[in-house]
Image (cartoon, helix red, strand yellow):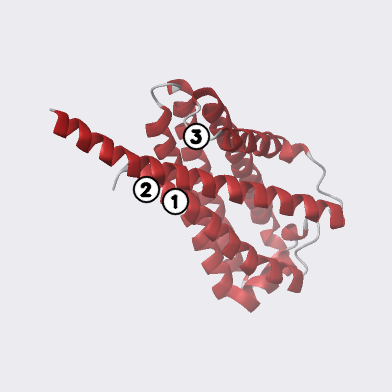
Amino acid sequence: MKMQKLGGYSAIATVCLGVILVAMVLPLASRYGLNQPNAGLDPAKVSALYAGASTTVWAASILEILGSILFLFVAFALYERMRDKAPNLVRMLIIAASASCVLTLVETMIGIRSMAAMKGAGDVSAYKPFLVMGQGLSTASDNISGWVTLLIGMAVLTTRALPRFIGWAFLALGILGVISFALPTNTDAGAVGIAILIVLGLLYAISAVWMGIALLRAQETAVPAKTMAAQAR
């Protein structure tokens, strides 16, 4: 399978995985009180989540890892698509996407093993350092993912290899992703914050699906072109 075609399917698949993850995680976060700021650092709440929904937690972790790997495929597809016009940008994109994937793997493994170790422990408060470490890795992964998104936007706008809407959307989302770690997290987002997150999620979903379709259409149009060239010879 050609890399651009694989990247196109992967871009669409990441959106589908994101929807599934949201549908799985949000009800659990609400049920176990983990939808409040810094609630993920409370060992008692995290332990209760794993004790009551360990299967769902494992499934969500696997989907998160799969999503990071699929997005790495997207990065390689974009490298193949734009390496002639923006070689340095897409090289940095590959490096950043690889780093984000590795950090996601490490953060997910530490988180799931920490929660599994808490089960049946007499004093779960001793596991708080692991939760802090996992949150730090998650923040680092999110920040690098922001750089990946930013680099995609810059590369698209520079090369015009994809529709400009995709470039501007990824550029805006990338900037927000890069600076998100510096935003306050000790207050409740409220209805306005939730509405903003929904809008940003929809913007990413539309842009990623559009990018996936563009990568797949490029493969479809490339085949007839090669055939016509061969017949001309």
Per the rendering, the mark at residue 10 is 1
Q: Residues within 10 Å of mark 2 (few under 14, many from 20)?
A: some
Q: Residue furthest bottom?
A: 52
Q: Give the residue drawn at x 43%, y 47%.
A: 8
Q: Amino acid at mark 1?
A: Ser
Secondary structure category for the residue under label 3: loop
- Left or right: 58 with respect to 176? left
Q: Position of residue 180 (x, y in %)?
A: 73, 40
Please determine whether, in this image, residue 27 is positioned above or below residue 208.
Answer: below
Cβ–Cβ below 8 Å for labels 1 and 2? Answer: yes
Q: Give the residue drawn at x 66%, y 39%.
A: 173
Where is mark 3, residue-wise? Answer: 162
Q: Position of residue 98 (x, y in %)?
A: 46, 39
Q: Position of residue 172 (x, y in %)?
A: 68, 35
Per the rendering, the mark at residue 6 is 2
Q: Amino acid at mark 2?
A: Leu
Secondary structure category for the residue under label 2: helix
Q: Give the residue drawn at x 60%, y 51%.
A: 205
Q: Amino acid at mark 3?
A: Leu
Q: CA distance from mark 3 to mark 1?
A: 16 Å
Query: From this viewpoint, is residue 72 visible?
Result: no
- Left or right: 130 with respect to 212? right
**Nearer the viewer's eye, disc 3 or disc 1?**
3
Task: Give the mark nearer the N terminus: 3 vs 1.
Answer: 1
- Picture quarter containing residue 35? bottom right
Q: Position of residue 72 (x, y in %)?
A: 45, 43
Cβ–Cβ below 8 Å for labels 3 and 1? Answer: no
Per the rendering, the mark at residue 72 is none
Q: CA distance from mark 1 to mark 2?
A: 6 Å
Secondary structure category for the residue under label 1: helix
Task: Give the mark nearer the N terminus: 2 vs 3.
Answer: 2
